[in-house]
Image: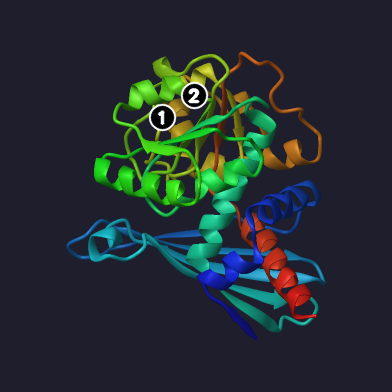
Amino acid sequence: MEFFDAKQIEENLDWHDCVEALREMFAKGCEAPVRHHHTMEVPGHQEATMLLMPAWLPGKYAGLKLVNVYPDNPQKGLPTIMGNYLLMDGGSGTPIASMDGGELTARRTAAASALASDYLSRKDADKLLIVGSGRLANYLGYAHGAVRELKKIRIWARDESKAQTVAVKYKEAGLDAEPANNLEEAVGWADIVSCATMSAAPLILGKWLRAGVHLDLIGSFKPTMRETDDEAVSRAEVFVDTREGALAEAGDLLIAMQNGTFSQDDIRAELSELADGGHPGRTDEEEITLFKSVGASLEDLAAAIRCFENWQKRKE
């Protein structure tokens, strides 16, 4: 069995490859049961979450991800997401690769965000606002840059120094990036707003959204968490990674449904329908589009397979 740490995953799974691996898997599909979701008490800290996510391509590959989400880990100098991915031979069940679960999760999440944007943001979108300063904030600029020609990136975070740190990393990579001081102003400026936070209360307000903007919500993953308000959801054309996952865990949508401002019939399509051509995605330059992702084991399997097969090719 091969072991892939974060650096080896990065070396064998570039952003374009990751986006295309997800596009192909969403279009063709795989077996992907709803993930197990368990809350764990952590004395003296916020509750943690354990996620178990299986998926398989019959006779080809099978995979299982174990992820622990500890919201207070940054206070200890540790990543919020800790985990491991096990890739197995689908014909025998033999383990063939163990991969850093945090890195794989971050890369596939950012890639899914970019894949949705490829269908939902305007083709001329070139200004990206990243809301948040965690691991994903450091990846979203590159992921979205794989599908859109970005000219400017702004980063907003509650802690301005952390937004500055993320901006500096992008600038060191040659991208035009800077921290944003005023969130409302930055939302009005952006063509794409990508929100990757652990927020339980709305950060992005619907009244701030201008015509033609694409709102990407990928941080919250519990029914009690939300990054935007009812007005944003009701104003937008709403798309999700999977209906099953969104209707079980997407607080942004579920809370709006409880308030009577949204219904499950208002979901226009899921990523599989965009990827296989069943839905055209954005149909009007002026419409507001919203993509809500809670994550799907299909994404992990697609990214893990592409990483492993790219590694095999490099060996040859």
Asked whether, in this view, residue 156 is left or right of residue 303, the answer is: left
**Residue 173 coordinates in the image, percent (x, y):** 49, 51
Q: Are marks 1 and 2 in contact (CB under 8 Å)?
A: yes
| Number of numbered discs | 2
Give the residue drawn at x 44%, y 51%. 172
**Horizontal and vertical percent for residue 226?**
39, 36
| Near-viewer residue (11 or 251) | 11
Count residues near mark 2 (Cα–Cα under 10 Å), then give few for <14, some for 14-19, many for 20+: many
What residue would you read off at disc 2?
233
Q: What's the CA distance linking mark 1 and mark 2? A: 8 Å
Which residue carries the number 1 mark? 228
Is residue 2 placed above or below 17 in the rendered structure?
A: below
Mark 2: which amino acid? Val
Image quadrant occupied by the N terminus: bottom right
Q: Is residue 159 visible?
A: no
Question: Residue at point 34% right, 32% down?
Answer: 180
Q: Residues within 10 Å of mark 1 (few under 14, many from 20)?
A: many
Residue depicted at x 40% and y 18%: 208
Above or below 108: residue 255: above
